[in-house]
Amino acid sequence: MIPFLMFTRHEPEPDSTFGGWLMPVVPPMVSAATGALLVPYAAEGQARLALLLACYAMFGLSLIASMIVTTLIWYRLTMHKLGPAATVPTLWIVLGWLGQSITAVNLLGGVAHLALPAPYSTAFVAFGLVYGVPVFGFALLWAGLAAAVTIRTARERLPFSLTWWSFTFPVGTVVTGTSALALHTGSDVVAWMAVAFYVGLVGAWATVAVRTARGSARGHLFRPPAPA
């Protein structure tokens, strides 16, 4: 619905793209990962097969749409720079679909044998790594870029707002995605990277939660911005 409105009613400016544009297109990826956990409990036969295929379809839907939006974000950053400081945390939202897609494709690969025969089920297992490892590399690149931009902005001024929650869920998906890769590859290095991301997630969540509680108690966090 939101892409339809953007195509037909909204009039976005060339510099209006930001990480929040990913919010409407990431949920199908979350559903794909969650659906993988339900596949073993679906009735054997056509019901289980339909659920598995639907999860892969949602994976593809969200994947392609997220790639398009991320390309627009990269273009905006290149041509129009960072924009308002309050939008900088939303750069981390890109990690959301990256990590969640790695998680989804590996979870689905792990249960594909319950609904599909070989060689298709084994192909989906392999696809988890063939897709996941390269995308994890891009996730590391984006995490480094987002961290550098955030630190640069914080040195100048990065006021607290609810966009700071962008530091939490996206990093959480990288934790689950990295954990899935560590499980399927047996790599100790990847396992320790999952631990490192988890430590960062806990620290970010605690910081943002405390700041949100403090701002809510003082009553200024949810006030509308002052008129210019």
Image (cartoon, grey):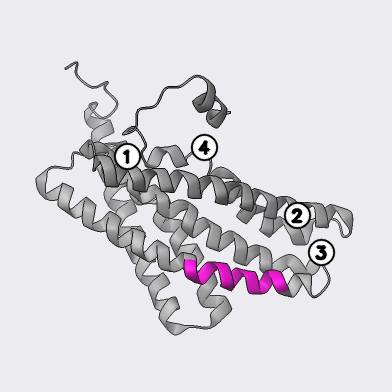
Residue under numbered circle 3: 115
Q: Is residue 63 magenta?
A: no
Any mark on residue 53, and which? 2
Q: Are marks 2 and 3 in contact (CB under 8 Å)?
A: no
The amino acid at mark 4 is: Pro
Q: Which residues are magenta?
A: 123-134
Q: Quadrant of residue 53?
A: bottom right
Q: Residue at x 44, y 77 (%)?
A: 190
- Alpha-carbon distance for marks 4 and 3? 29 Å
Any mark on residue 75, and which? none
Residue under numbered circle 4: 24
Q: Secondary structure at mark 3?
A: loop
- Alpha-carbon distance for marks 2 and 1? 34 Å
Compared to residue 6, the image places residue 64 above or below, namely: below
**Of marks 4 and 2, which one's residue comes earlier in the chain?**
4
**How busy is the neighbourhood of tag 4: few (under 14 within 10 Å), some, or many (20 plus)?**
some
Residue 115 image position (x, y, % from top left): 81, 64
Q: Quadrant of residue 40?
A: bottom right
The amino acid at mark 3 is: Ala
